[in-house]
Amino acid sequence: MKKLLVITMVALTAACSSNKSMIIDYGAADAKSVQKIDPSIGYQALEQAPVCCSNLSQLNYQKISAPGKVDFTLTTQDPAFQFRTGKSFVKAVELPEVNGPIKVAVSSPIVTSVFAPTLLVLDKNFDPIDVYGEETINYENGSLLSIDRFFGNVELPAVFRDGRQAKYLVVLTTDQAMQQTTKLDPPDPKAVELGREADVVKMYSNQPIAHTATGVFRLAFDYAPGAASSANDMVEQQSSADALISEPAAASTASAVAVSSAKTKTSPIQPETEAMFNQLIENAVKASDFDKALSFVEEAERAGSTSARDALVEAMKKHH
């Protein structure tokens, strides 16, 4: 028996040494290259990106149809949304209809930078129910079988105490997260022996890891497929089985990430972005496309413009 165990361990070690991919799982195929992009590129792109929409219902939601892992790459081409915690590029998913809770494991690999995700939970009306940020999704040191990453386990109850059910998830990051960095713990000596790039970097560099505006992350879903019970049925069960219902976060926490209203003060717009909007407004007025011109005005103001309406008036005087 001992001889068999030794042979098995030798074979496993040999396989690991010759095939690093058996040990390292960065998630998306482009994870390593994406997380090596200079973070300043993402910051600048986010700063200049127009706000995509005024309501979370206007995002495109990717439907989750089966349990398992789903890898995402968040880029500067994704929509940017203005939250009370700052503007962020976003990915959005629609949850499946199930009978019980949905477990979600959130993972974001660390290479030379990391995307620090926040998970916003919405009901069927796209209103916030709960939010999971750095208190839940945080740094996890790598081991022989895993890389350094941001990681967190979330369990969405079948129904929250107020009777609402989770229907959508929005993944974002916050201004505060992007201003922070992460200092890595020393690597696992055994992992270093295998020559893994990330661990070699850790050995020879004490540089803090920047948190990015773009990046890669994975959502792993675990649930029992099946049609969901109605919220009313679940609330009735709740009175006799409180232990089955997860305690939601304080309402103030969820609302802190909730959507900013049109009257909420936005970050100052970049001069070149404001000039771009003003030119688009003038072009639309010149073409007598007033609906489009007004649309550009509203979009510019959501992005922080203070001159868009003046640009509209001036364009009307000039061309009509």
Image (cartoon, rainbow, N blue to C red):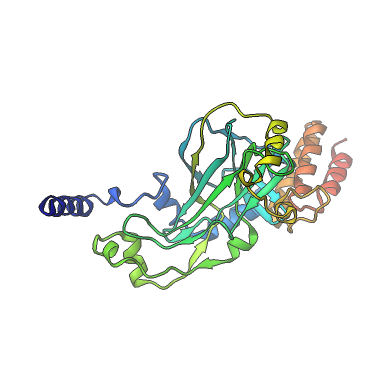
User: Is 241 situated left or right of 196 in this image?
Assistant: right
Q: Is residue 2 above or below residue 95?
A: below
Residue drawn where x is 33% and y is 55% of the image = 145
Q: Nearer the viewer, residue 260 or 35?
A: 260
Q: How many marks?
A: 0
Q: Quadrant of the C terminus?
A: top right
Residue drawn where x is 76% and y is 47% of the image = 300
Residue farthest toward the left in the current orientation of the protein: 3
Q: Is residue 8 above or below residue 55?
A: below
User: Is 41 situated left or right of 195 in this image?
Assistant: right
Residue drawn where x is 55% and y is 27% of the image = 226
Q: Please state the horizontal and vertical placement of residue 267, each as a whole percent of the image.
A: 73, 58
Residue farthest toward the top in the current orientation of the protein: 227
Q: Nearer the viewer, residue 98 or 87?
A: 98
Q: Please state the horizontal and vertical placement of residue 23, each as a whole percent of the image.
A: 30, 51
For the question of whether residue 50 can be seen, the reply is: no
For the question of whether residue 306 can be seen, the reply is: yes
Q: Is residue 53 above or below residue 41?
A: above
Q: Nearer the viewer, residue 312 or 31?
A: 31
Q: Please state the horizontal and vertical placement of residue 170, each as a whole percent of the image.
A: 62, 44
User: Is 50 situated left or right of 68 in this image?
Assistant: right
